[in-house]
Amino acid sequence: MGVGDVSKRILLGRKLRSAQLGETLLPKRIALPVFASDALSSVAYAPDEVFIMLGIAGASAYAWSWKIGLAVALVMFTVVASYRQTVHAYPSGGGDYEVATVNLGRTAGITVASALLVDYVLTVAVSISSAAQYAAGAIPSLIGHEATVASVAVIILTALNLRGVRESGTLFAVPTYLFMAAILGMGGYGLLRLLSGSLPDAESADLRILPEEGWEGPLNQIALIFLLARAFSSGCAALTGVEAISNGVPAFQRPKSKNAATTLLLLGLIAVSMLMSIILLANEMRIRYVDPHALDQLRTAGGDAVPEGYQQHPVISQIANGVFDHFSPGFYFVVTVTGIILVLAANTAFNGFPVLGSILARDGFAPRALGARGDRLAYSNGIVFLAVMAIVLIVLFDAQTTKLIQLYIVGVFVSFNLSQLGMIRHWTRHLATEKDAGERRRMQRSRAINTFGLGLTAVVLVIVLITKFLAGAWITILAMGFFFAVMKAIKKHYDNVERELAADETDKALPTRVHAIVLVSKLHKPTLRALAFAKATRPNALEGVYVSVDQKDTARLLEEWDDRNTGIPLKVLHSPYREVVKPIVEYASAIRRANPRGVVAVYIPEYVVGRWWEQFLHNQTALRLKGRLLFSPGVMVISVPYQLRSSEIALEREERDEQRVHAGDLRRGRARDRNGRR
Amino acid sequence: MGVGDVSKRILLGRKLRSAQLGETLLPKRIALPVFASDALSSVAYAPDEVFIMLGIAGASAYAWSWKIGLAVALVMFTVVASYRQTVHAYPSGGGDYEVATVNLGRTAGITVASALLVDYVLTVAVSISSAAQYAAGAIPSLIGHEATVASVAVIILTALNLRGVRESGTLFAVPTYLFMAAILGMGGYGLLRLLSGSLPDAESADLRILPEEGWEGPLNQIALIFLLARAFSSGCAALTGVEAISNGVPAFQRPKSKNAATTLLLLGLIAVSMLMSIILLANEMRIRYVDPHALDQLRTAGGDAVPEGYQQHPVISQIANGVFDHFSPGFYFVVTVTGIILVLAANTAFNGFPVLGSILARDGFAPRALGARGDRLAYSNGIVFLAVMAIVLIVLFDAQTTKLIQLYIVGVFVSFNLSQLGMIRHWTRHLATEKDAGERRRMQRSRAINTFGLGLTAVVLVIVLITKFLAGAWITILAMGFFFAVMKAIKKHYDNVERELAADETDKALPTRVHAIVLVSKLHKPTLRALAFAKATRPNALEGVYVSVDQKDTARLLEEWDDRNTGIPLKVLHSPYREVVKPIVEYASAIRRANPRGVVAVYIPEYVVGRWWEQFLHNQTALRLKGRLLFSPGVMVISVPYQLRSSEIALEREERDEQRVHAGDLRRGRARDRNGRR
């Protein structure tokens, strides 16, 4: 293929793709752990929060935990069923954002996007705070330093993601399957011991829980409903992350939608089994669990306060301790795996954030650079932003999962609702044109599922808003409003620019002449190359321009110039105050004013160096000059690079950077195999 | 003057100068305060340090303070006499650095430069720490927070200098003359009262000073000499800043050298008078002054420790308090003016640092950008660096002047010595060729003065090194070594690059053809302008290049392109993974490979926007692409800017920036008058 052949449109796509790019699509057994860690990890804190909420009215209220678990399971299956419709209807992976935008319009779309952005931040804050609590449970010396531990963990995650972690399937598969094995194994073994009558009591079984003031004695109906609603809201934390699969359909093996739907169902089944088995065992083992920052709610059997320094383990830890009869390897295994899955869940947000960013960028709601793969700066800014926000929350709320959970879930349910509403519209629209009876039946069934889903998630959203608004959800809603406003503003800016730039008929006039000036600082290779390049473009006028700041230097240069006999005139601009940029800008503007239909081409010789500190030693003036000339109409700036030997270092570095994995690659179906090929 | 007339060399210098630039040369009465604040301000702490050092052996050693004052005065006059020779011989203002470089070579030159750089940092740290002590003396609630007060003051100074303070003569003249009036007035009035027998004792007159362990009783000779040497070293702090005038000769009114020499003499006389009158009054008023952090050295007349919360005022404050009979306006006036002069002295360093930087840049020892006036970034970096270093010292030494003074002066005396040695060489060289007898006599006299100066300052340097090395001077020497190494490395880099870039005969070959490609992202005004400009340069081949990431967008663009009928072919590069930069770089390289003697010209349409946040929304890809194309040989990059309406904001901001005063302008003879003209 001759590259000189410019008269045809050549498609280079295939060649590039086969030479350098490839797709590794995920089989179900790998896709499940990749997308499930967020959703599954919530069983590490959701049951605890249910017990904490119920415990406000004393341990007797624990009797409701069963029913709350079942209610959460019902919502879970409903949401799973709804999203199974989505993955079939929208296999492109746009998820809730796409569903809302297509069916309900832009405003709904960016509402969903704001909700998801906020939820990514909270996923990091909640998961890592919970992981810090598990860590403190296993390593007592960390107690009281949870916020520090959590902040450090976020910083480490950030560093790894900035560096570019290989997000391989194995990385997810091993801990996720171990976590499933640990929780379900513990649940199964516990059940066996329960049936054989040998299930021991938990370490906290002998404790009593003092009801909070105003919650003593038999509750009236309204108080009871409110209590259950709060516990249910917190339990719904188990639902976060379920939507992840709908964003990742393109990464699945064919048939993509079918495999994604199956994986979604599996995820729902596993999550519910884990949740229910934990609630079951916790009740049977008579676990008593209160807010770790309100241990004075606990009383010993004798009615005394628990001793100073009493350590309350998370529910999963207590179950593990009991079921495995204080066999410490079992305990440590469960706790370690739980901690890892929580960190993995947080990492999910680091991957999801840039993916969502690139989709928003494509639609003009985020800086366009986010849309191009490999813009490291843009990715980095997103990752750092996410980390800073998460750390602020962790520090503000002292890494208390119980408090952070009050901010959580609002966002998820906002997007659940808008997504379901969008799906109903979707089916209604398609039903209007569909003639095939079988197809119509299927669509009607889907619409019914989504309608039920909308009804149920709307109820949950209202419950969550009522029970959590003052406790923290208002912060979430404020943050969503902020993201919403920013995205609107960016979109408006792009739209304005587009209007201003729209081409019209007047744009056809060609400039009549090109006046080229070549900046000369010394007469060395870069300058000679710039002169040669400028000459090769055969401009109507060509001259060198030298800014004189020193009499002697100028005289020497003029002599050299004459010796070289380039045939190009040299203009000397005097600058007694060592200003370089201003005289050149003014000279270029003067040329342009004298010939408004012409173009001034300013050639700047540039050094290309390799080491970072060498950058400071060169091109600073060129940089300022270029920045300044941008404002001069009718002036174009030509960089003529001269590669110094050390530039090879930089080239290698650039190429190494390009090879790097970027956060979110895997879940967009862009995995790289072990040999570095994608 | 026709700008199209390119065959002649036109000198624009005069026009520019008269239109916008002007010089305000300083008369002696303004030059004195501008250059003297640093040297004069040291009387605010030098006497205190002398008393502290002597006090180690108890108040009886104060008897030596007289002689130490006289010794310092002797050094002062010697140095002044030496520098009077320098300002005559080197009226260009290069100061010690120039003298050392010209006469002793590069290594000596950058040794002096390193010494001066370190001393600028210490000037800031010492002056501001001392000012903080005065402030704490006047406002008791600041006691114990001196380091914080000092750090905040440095930050404020930094902000003012970054913003660009008008460094007007008045700004210096008023407080400097007030300070002279305050100290000399207080001295004169005190002397009058002494002669009339009405001079009261100081507030601390009744206290006793416990000698430090090992210094009790009559001292042996060696101990005494060491004690006096230490006190003398600290007293020599009064000499810092004397060299400033030799750097500022070009800012003086004509006859520059003569005026500078006279001002120098005046400076010496005033400084010595102030120093001696303070020592005299302190002795007569029986002031007792110890290290403010070793108040347990003080004993009341009864032999008890001073009460908790005893406040020890600096020497000048105590004198003011006594001489003015506790008349508080007098006290506050003296203290306030002293504080201001100390801050002004610190500001001197903020001005001197960039001036020295620009001289070093001119010679290739510092990044070249520092040499161009108005490179805000370069100036800013220098100012921030100076501030950060000063704050580090202040915090490390808890703003204790007594400790910081141990680091000071080494640098000054290193440069005194090398400068004197250089001057001796200078005269010897000139004497070798000079025939005129009168001129020869004058030169010989000058050489004698400089020789005496070298001898004396060498002795002082040795004393300072011996008495201060372990107490902190080693830090100074380490820092000097660091600066020295960095400057050497930068010079070596520039030399290497120069060698690599030297033009030879092979550089004459002209490229045979220009292949132009215009990047097309959309078909809007910026693209059309870039196409028009590219066409105007009449390249051998011209095509648009579009990177396709989306089937539909591509189809739409191709249609528009055909509709426009530009006559230019469009090449479409497919990029299934939304990479934009890589396909273009590879395509440009392929063109170049097919025709190694040709040049590839890549035209990039760029948006010019006004608001800082708009920058993030545009040109990010262009930026990455330009960075990447720099490494492709034979490729030149052409930015074709398109000014959006909002770019006017940025243009105005740029122009405002250019109007700004830069640190050090005044002392380089670049003052601006009140109307903003320079």
Image: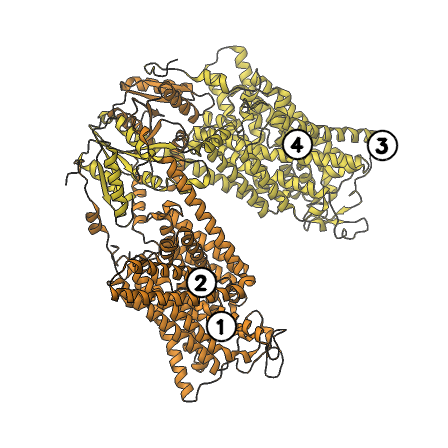
Chain colours: A orange, B yellow
**Distance CA(mark 3)–CA(mark 4):** 28 Å
Q: Amino acid at mark 4?
A: Ala
Q: With respect to residue A631, does B206 lie above or below? A: below
Residue where numbered disc 4 is placed: B71
- Determine if residue A220 is in view: yes
In which chain is the residue bearing label 1? Answer: A
Quadrant for residue B191, please give it. top right
| Disc with the residue nearer the chain's start (3 vs 4) | 4
- Determine if residue B405 is in view: no
Of badges 3 and 4, the one in the foreground is 3
Residue where numbered disc 2 is placed: A413
Of badges 3 and 1, the one in the foreground is 1
Q: Position of residue A266 (x, y in %)?
A: 33, 71
- Secondary structure type for disc 1: helix
Name the residue at 23% across, 43% down. Answer: B573
Residue where numbered disc 1 is placed: A48
Q: With respect to residue A667, does B150 lie above or below? A: above
Q: With respect to residue B238, does A15 lie above or below? A: below
Residue where numbered disc 3 is placed: B197
Q: What is the quadrant of the N terminus of chain B in the image?
A: top left
